[in-house]
C-alpha cells in the first residue's frame, strides 16, 4: 500500500542535501485522530515541503505498525481477526493522511517482503554476536496461556508509579520490564492468575554500546529539552538489556535456530521496517535492507516524546552495531501529547476526534494552520474543535479575505511586481519575514508554532496597511505601497507552502507568481491576476 506524491517548488540548487525523513509508524488498531495529526505526520510533511523550497531532496516514509499487541487486544472485543483489523486501519490511515494533505513518499503495510527484510536484518545481527541468548524472567497468564508483554499486561511504572502497559511508560518515557511492574495483572482479566517463568530469549546488550550512546547524546545540539533530559536520565544508570524476541503468535516470526516459536519485538522491528519502507520509496532492492539508509543522506526522525527511548537509545545502539554509527539520526524531533478537553486522546474512554471527521467539517488548510499554531512541541497543549474553527477564521481566513478585497479594489493595472518595486522599509520587513520563516522551517530550530505565528502576524500587518491607505487619487508613494501589498501576498503564499499547501498552490497559481530559492528577492507577481484571488484562491479557507 503506497501513498506517493509530494509536489515541491524547486528552489536553490546550491549544494542540495538529501534527507531520509521518518514518522513513527502508527499502530493499526484505529484511524488517526487529531492528536496523531498534530504530531510527527504533519511535522514531517511540513519539513519535507520546506526542504523542497530550498531544492533539497527528501524521502519521507512511514508504515502501519501492525505487529503491536494492541492490535490483538483491540481486535478481540470487536470480534475480528487482528490481520483484518490491521488491513482495515492501514487503509483508513492512508485515506486520512491524504485528506490532511500529508504526503509521505511511501506508507506501506507489513507484508512478506517486510518480514523477510526484518528477519534478514536480525539474522545478520545474530551472526555478528550482537544478539545474545539470555534467560529472561517473564510474566505468564495461566488462563490466556501467553507471555504478558506490551498490551497484554498493565501495572504501575517502577519509575513514576503511574499506571502503564508493558515495554514503555507513556507518562515518563522510561522503558519497563513487565516483570518489574508494580502490581502487574493481565489486561484480559485482572483476576487471571499470573506466574513468573524463565524463558530463553534473544536480547541486545545495550551497555555494550554505552560509549557510542553517550557520545551521540553529548553531541546533540538544538534538540528539544525533554528528549535530551530523558536520554541523560537513562544514561545515568546501567542500561538494561533489551528483549528482542518473546513468545507470541502475533508478529514477525523469528527465523534464528532455537527461537522459531518467538516473534521480534515490534519496537526493535521498527528500525529495519523503516529501512524497508525507504527502499520501497526509492524503488531499489537491497541485498541488505540497512543499505537503504545511505551514508550520503541525513536522517531526520519525527516522533512523539513517549517513543523517545526507542529512537534515541534502542535504535541508535542498533545502528551503531550495523554500520559503526555512520548513519545515525541527524535530528530527532519530538512532540508532547496533544490533549482533548484537557485529557489525553483516548479511544477507549471516548475522548477522541477522528481526523477524518475533523477534516470533513473544516477545510484542510484551516485544520493544518490551527494544528501548526497550537502544536505541542515543548509541552502538552489542548485541542478544541470550536477554537480550531474560531482561530483559523480570525487569524487566517478573515484577514486573508480582507487583504484580497483591498487588493482587488486597488485596481493596480499591468506589469509584474518584484522586489525592486518595494521601498526600503517594505523590503526590510519582507526580508526579515523570510528569514524568520526559514528559521522556523530549518533544523535545529524547526517549529511549526513559530512558523504559524510569524506567518499570521505578517498577514495581519499587511491587512493593517491595506486598510489604512486610500483607494482613490493615490499618490505615487501610495501606488507603490499598494503594489508592495501584492508582493507581500505573494510572499505569504510562498512561505505558506509547508503549512497550507493547497491554499498556497491556489494563491501562487492565481497570481502567476514566479520565484526561486530566495523567496523575496526572486518573487514576481502580475497585479492583473489579483482579481483571480477573489474567484477561488481563498475558497479552501473560506468554505
Image: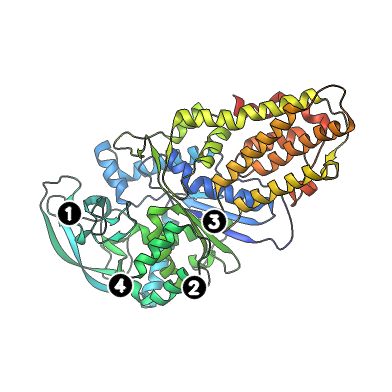
Which residue is more in the foreground, 183 or 230? 230
- Seen at 45% across and 58% down, the residue is 225
Q: Position of residue 404 (x, y in %)?
A: 72, 27
Residue under numbered circle 2: 325
Q: Mark number for residue 21?
A: 3
Q: Is residue 450 visible?
A: yes
Residue under numbered circle 4: 238
Q: Crowding near pointer 2: few (<14 within 10 Å), some, many (20+)?
A: some
Q: Earlier in the sequence, mark 4 or mark 1?
A: 1
Q: Earlier in the sequence, mark 2 or mark 1?
A: 1
Q: Position of residue 195 (x, y in %)?
A: 12, 58
Q: Earlier in the sequence, mark 3 or mark 4?
A: 3
**Callout 1 secondary element:** strand
**Callout 3 secondary element:** strand
Q: Is residue 283 visible?
A: no
Q: Position of residue 479 (x, y in %)?
A: 85, 31
Residues under labels 4 and 1: Cα distance? 23 Å
Residue under numbered circle 1: 184
Amino acid at each position: 500500500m503506497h501513498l506517493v506524491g509530494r509536489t515541491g517548488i524547486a528552489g536553490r540548487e546550491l549544494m542540495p542535501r538529501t534527507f531520509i525523513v521518518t514518522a513513527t509508524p502508527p499502530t493499526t488498531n484505529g484511524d488517526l485522530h487529531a492528536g496523531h495529526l498534530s504530531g510527527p505526520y504533519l511535522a514531517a510533511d511540513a519539513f519535507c515541503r520546506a526542504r523542497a523550497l530550498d531544492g533539497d531532496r527528501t524521502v519521507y516514509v512511514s508504515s502501519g505498525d501492525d505487529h503491536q499487541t494492541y492490535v490483538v487486544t483491540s481486535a478481540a472485543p470487536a470480534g475480528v481477526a487482528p490481520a483484518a483489523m490491521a488491513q482495515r486501519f492501514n487503509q483508513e490511515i492512508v485515506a486520512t493522511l491524504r485528506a490532511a494533505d500529508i504526503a509521505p513518499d511511501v506508507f506501506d503495510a507489513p507484508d512478506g517482503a517486510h518480514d523477510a527484510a526484518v528477519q534478514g536484518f536480525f539474522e545478520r545481527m545474530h551472526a555478528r554476536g550482537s544478539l545474545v541468548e539470555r534467560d529472561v524472567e517473564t510474566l505468564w497468564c495461566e488462563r490466556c496461556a501467553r507471555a504478558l508483554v506490551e498490551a497484554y499486561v498493565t501495572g504501575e511504572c517502577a519509575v513514576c508509579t503511574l499506571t502503564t502497559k508493558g515495554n514503555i511508560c507513556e507518562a515518563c518515557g522510561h522503558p519497563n520490564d513487565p516483570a518489574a511492574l508494580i502490581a502487574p495483572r493481565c489486561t484480559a482479566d485482572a483476576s487471571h492468575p499470573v506466574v513468573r517463568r524463565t524463558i530463553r530469549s534473544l536480547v541486545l546488550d545495550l551497555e555494550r554500546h554505552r560509549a557510542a550512546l553517550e557520545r551521540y547524546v553529548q553531541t546533540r545540539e538544538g534538540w528539544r529539552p525533554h528528549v535530551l533530559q530523558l536520554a541523560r536520565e537513562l544514561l545515568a544508570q546501567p542500561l538494561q538489556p533489551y528483549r528482542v524476541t518473546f513468545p507470541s503468535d502475533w508478529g514477525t516470526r523469528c527465523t534464528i535456530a532455537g527461537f522459531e516459536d518467538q516473534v521480534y519485538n515490534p519496537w526493535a522491528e521498527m528500525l529495519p521496517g523503516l529501512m524497508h519502507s525507504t527502499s520501497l520509496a526509492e524503488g531499489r532492492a537491497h541485498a541488505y535492507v540497512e543499505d537503504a539508509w545511505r551514508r550520503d543522506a541525513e536522517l531526520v526522525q519525527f516522533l512523539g516524546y513517549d517513543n523517545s527511548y526507542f529512537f534515541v537509545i534502542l535504535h541508535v545502539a542498533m545502528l551503531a552495531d550495523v554500520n559503526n554509527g555512520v548513519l545515525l539520526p541527524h535530528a530527532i524531533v519530538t512532540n508532547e501529547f496533544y490533549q482533548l478537553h484537557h485529557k489525553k486522546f483516548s479511544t477507549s474512554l471516548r475522548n477522541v476526534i477522528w481526523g477524518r471527521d475533523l477534516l470533513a467539517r473544516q477545510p484542510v488548510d484551516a485544520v493544518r494552520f490551527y494544528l501548526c499554531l497550537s502544536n505541542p512541541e515543548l509541552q502538552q497543549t489542548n485541542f478544541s474543535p470550536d477554537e480550531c474553527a474560531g482561530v483559523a477564521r480570525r487569524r487566517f481566513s478573515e484577514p486573508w479575505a480582507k487583504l484580497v478585497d483591498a487588493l482587488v479594489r486597488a485596481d493596480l493595472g499591468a506589469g509584474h511586481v518584484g522586489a525592486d518595486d518595494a521601498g526600503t522599509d517594505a523590503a526590510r520587513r519582507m526580508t526579515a519575514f523570510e528569514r524568520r520563516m526559514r528559521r522556523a522551517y530549518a533544523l535545529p530550530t524547526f517549529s511549526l508554532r513559530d512558523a504559524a505565528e510569524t506567518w499570521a502576524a505578517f498577514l495581519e500587518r499587511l491587512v493593517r496597511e491595506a486598510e489604512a491607505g486610500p483607494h482613490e487619487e493615490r499618490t505615487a508613494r501610495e501606488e507603490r505601497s499598494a503594489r508592495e501589498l501584492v508582493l507581500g501576498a505573494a510572499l505569504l503564499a510562498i512561505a505558506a507552502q509547508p503549512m497550507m499547501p493547497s491554499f498556497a498552490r491556489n494563491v501562487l497559481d492565481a497570481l502567476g507568481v514566479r520565484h526561486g530559492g530566495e523567496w523575496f528577492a526572486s518573487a514576481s507577481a502580475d497585479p492583473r491576476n489579483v482579481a483571480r484571488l477573489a474567484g477561488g484562491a481563498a475558497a479552501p479557507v473560506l468554505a
